[in-house]
Every structure is written in C-alpha cells, then in structure tokens.
Amino acid sequence: QVQLVESGGGLVQPVGSLRLSCAPSGSVWSAGAMAWYRHAPGKQRELVASTAVEGTKYTDSVKARFTIPRDNEENTAYLHMNSLQPEDQAVYYCKMDLWLTAFGGRTDYWGQGHQVAVTS
C-alpha cells in the first residue's frame, strides 16, 4: 500500500532554515497537486503552500519565506522554509493527489506529519 513518507524538519533557532520532503513509498503512475499543511496546538489546520497545474499559492504569513519546489520525475514535494519564526512552529503534513495506475482514479494521500520547532 502506498504511503507518503516525510523527512526533514526538526529544531531551529529563529531566522533559521529547515527543509521538508515528501514522497510516495511505492510506485505511482502520476502525482498531481501537492500541498503542505501545518497544525499548531490550539489552532486550526492551515494550508501553508500548494502547487498544481493552476499555479503555486502560499498563505500570507509565509510568502517570501517559504517555497514549495517539486520533482515531477520522483513525485517528490519539498518545503523550503527560511527566516523561521516561533509562530511557524507546528506539525507539518504533506498532501498529494496520486494516480496509482493509468486507469485508476485520483486519491488524496497524507504524510505522517513532521514536527518543526522554532525556539531560541
């Protein structure tokens, strides 16, 4: 069964940088939209960034600091986070639209979540 595997994250001081990556654990036919969400304690889950054929979008609080590059050959999504602030601290989840076969339907997959901690 295909799963999304995240890696990266960790602990960083304010204004530091971290990288997250996310890729399917098995073979897939194609990946569509990719996105990163975050969930901080006491707050609602928030869409941080997304990339699809329609374009790339960022929530206002991360614009000019975060980017969401993707590798279409490897079906991998990345989240490059710069100038991290304490308010960025959260568990970050990736989400992908995947087609497992050429004739199958599209299915949403979620990563397991990775903690990003920003503290001095």
Image (tube, rainbow, N blue to C red):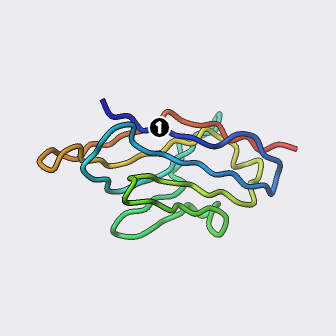
Kindly give the residue lying farthest to the top in the view shown: 1
x, y (%) of residue 86? 77, 47
- Residue 7, compared with residue 35, is above or below; it is above
Q: Is residue 112 left or right of residue 42?
A: left
Q: Is residue 26 left or right of residue 5?
A: left
Kindly give the residue lying farthest to the right in the view shown: 120
Label 1 environment density (alpha carbons within 10 Å; few <14, some 14–19, many ≥20): some
Residue at 37% x, 63% y is 52
Question: Camera-side residue: 94 or 22?
Answer: 22
Question: SS for tag 1?
Answer: strand
Q: How many marks?
A: 1
Q: Quadrant of residue 62?
A: bottom right
x, y (%) of residue 56? 45, 67
Query: Which amino acid, by three-letter code, is at mark 1?
Result: Val
Q: Quadrant of residue 11?
A: top right
x, y (%) of residue 87? 73, 48
Residue at 24% x, 49% y is 29
Residue at 24% x, 47% y is 99
Query: Which quarter of the rendering shows the N terminus?
Result: top left
- Residue 90, compared with residue 76, is above or below; it is above
Q: Is residue 46 left or right of residue 52?
A: right
Residue at 41% x, 54% y is 34
x, y (%) of residue 49? 51, 58
Query: Which quarter of the rendering shows the C terminus?
Result: top right
| Pointer 1 residue | 5
Kindly give the residue lying farthest to the left in the view shown: 103
Question: Camera-side residue: 28 or 64?
Answer: 28
Q: Is residue 44 left or right of residue 27?
A: right
